[in-house]
Amino acid sequence: MITGNASIQQTTTHKVVIPFYIYASLSLLAACVMLLLYTDVFDQHHFHPKTLAITHTMALGWGTMIILGASYQLVPVLVENALYSERLALISFVLAAIGIPLLVYGFFVFNMALPARVGGTLVNLAVLAYIINLILSIPRHKSRNVHAIFILTAGIWLFITTLTGLLLVYNFNDPFLPQNSLRYLSLHAHIGLVGWFLMLVLGVGTRLLPMFMISKYTNNKQLWIQFVTINLGLLLYILFDLASFPSASYMLPAILIGYGIFSFIWFCRKAYQQRIRKKIDGPMQISLLAVMLMIVPFIVLLVLILIAYYFKGHYQMGILYGFFIFFGWLTAIIMGMTFKTLPFIVWNKIYHKRAGQGKTPVPKALFSEKLFQTMFISYIIGFLCFATGLMTDITAMLKIGAAVLLMAAVFYNINVQKIVFHKPAS
Amino acid sequence: MKINSNSQEKCNQALEVLKDVYDPEIGLNVVDLGLIYRIDFNDAAQVIDVDMTLTTQYCPMGESIVNNVSGSMQQLFATYEINVTLTFEPPWDMEMISEAGKAFLQGY
């Protein structure tokens, strides 16, 4: 009999979480296929149908879907309360799963009419369902929990991003905003990158990385400073952009956001130094690499601001900046965290009732370590080749990079399927 | 960390068995991890009370770890009723990891 003054938390059912992981892994594959097929578009302006299609497949299909899925699993750990509604979580999946391909198709064929509008609306509804679920999951007495605040704020920024995106889709054919949609593209992208992805990775990362490394390091004051600097930086950026301030003024929000990023890296470094668990496994290595990769787009951003100030526009640097974020930092952290979370979700599904009834495999035995290492190496090679191709304008390098990244995506998908369809030895 | 018990001999037997119950993520057993707080034996009533904790209150693996503790105890003490009480008073702390556990995590 199991009793106690504290009940065992019922984790979010795998039926809600796993579809997000499968959808995201297939999206990565689709994005890498497009990257290989349309390599030629990368020497053109980023407002290109194929570039928009690849970017949104990566940002929504890959990054956002897997983060939403992982959030539903991790919210109870982070806010110390059960998820409010699994049904609402499933609804958010269905809405996003239908909306994303419609939206991407709209970009791909450069038709901002019905499919893109319906797709964008469904994505917005999915995000709304996510935020409502999140708000109702955070208990009142935990409302000052810094991690909960990070996640909730990130969710709100995500909604602002998708809503802005939808407005831009409508504005494309039926202009109602003061200027054309291209004018607001950078604003839309940065609200998503900084407000959603960066805020969420910081909120979750500062809780999970020390937890996985069994580190004593904790510093709530530092986390609150990160929270304030990043949000203040983003708000100033939005203000400067809408008021069409000169390029040089963007240094101020960039420095504030940069401070938040470096503070996060510093936090991870301290947590790493004060860890009890010395051995760092493969998924954690790739996650820590992702933390380091955060510096790269920030440096490119500073160069971009200088270039914009002195030379007025440079397509390649903009593409490089986006590539470093989506295929660099974001992909690395998701690849690492997938194999830190998904095996446990599936293990729990299969083995929690078998506990105490003989030997069970450890969660990390649910995927192939060898395939993971091959994926890791392919990913690094592909990423470096493609980035070099972008910097040198060598098409062959871009093709090789895209092909190797596609290989990494295939290996990733095989390992994800291996976990999801794991069958216990009878 | 010292584990409270009213029967040291039986408690040692129990701890040996519980050393085969692992936190699946950390790879360390629940005893060396410091999750077991108390094991009391009531031979007259044939009841064993186990007080234990988890590394975090909303640990996703919590249910399986607690089930595993209960199941392993039941196998060893088949005639007893096993009552596992989950508590977070005091909350788990890294200092509760035994020296052997720390050495394991540090790879010695």
Image: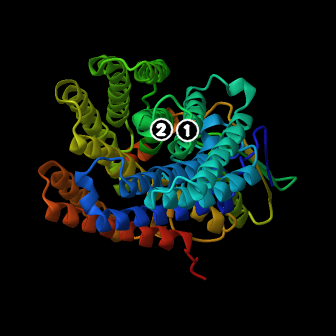
Q: Percent position (x, y) of residue A86?
A: 73, 52
Residue A365 versus residue A249 in the image, above or below: below
Q: Quadrant of residue A42?
A: bottom left
Which residue is situated farthest in the front direction here?
A174
Q: Secondary structure at mark 2?
A: helix
Q: Percent position (x, y) of residue A186?
A: 39, 35
Q: Are marks 2 and 1 in contact (CB under 8 Å)?
A: yes
Q: Which residue is mark 2?
A: A192
Q: Nearer the viewer, residue A235 or A118?
A: A118
At x 58%, y 64%, the residue is: A347
At x 51%, y 63%, the residue is: A363
Q: Quadrant of residue B38?
A: top right
Q: Please state if A276 lies on the left or on the right of A123 as rendered.
A: left
At x 28%, y 40%, the residue is: A292
| Residue A280 visible in rendering | no
Q: Percent position (x, y) of residue B85?
A: 75, 45
Residue A158 - label: 1
Which residue is situated farthest in the right direction here?
B45
Instruction: For the C terminus of chain A, give its image quadrant.
Output: bottom right
Label 1 Cα crowd, 10 Å radius (few <14 / some 14-19 / many 20+):
many
Q: Please state if A235 lies on the left or on the right of A403 as rendered.
A: right
The amino acid sitting under disc 2 is: Gly
- Distance from disc 2 to disc 1, alpha carbons, whole Å, reads 6 Å
Q: Please state if B10 lies on the left or on the right of B42 as rendered.
A: left
The amino acid sitting under disc 1 is: Leu
| Residue A23 visible in rendering | yes
Q: What is the chain letter for disc 2? A: A
Q: Nearer the viewer, residue A17 or A189?
A: A189
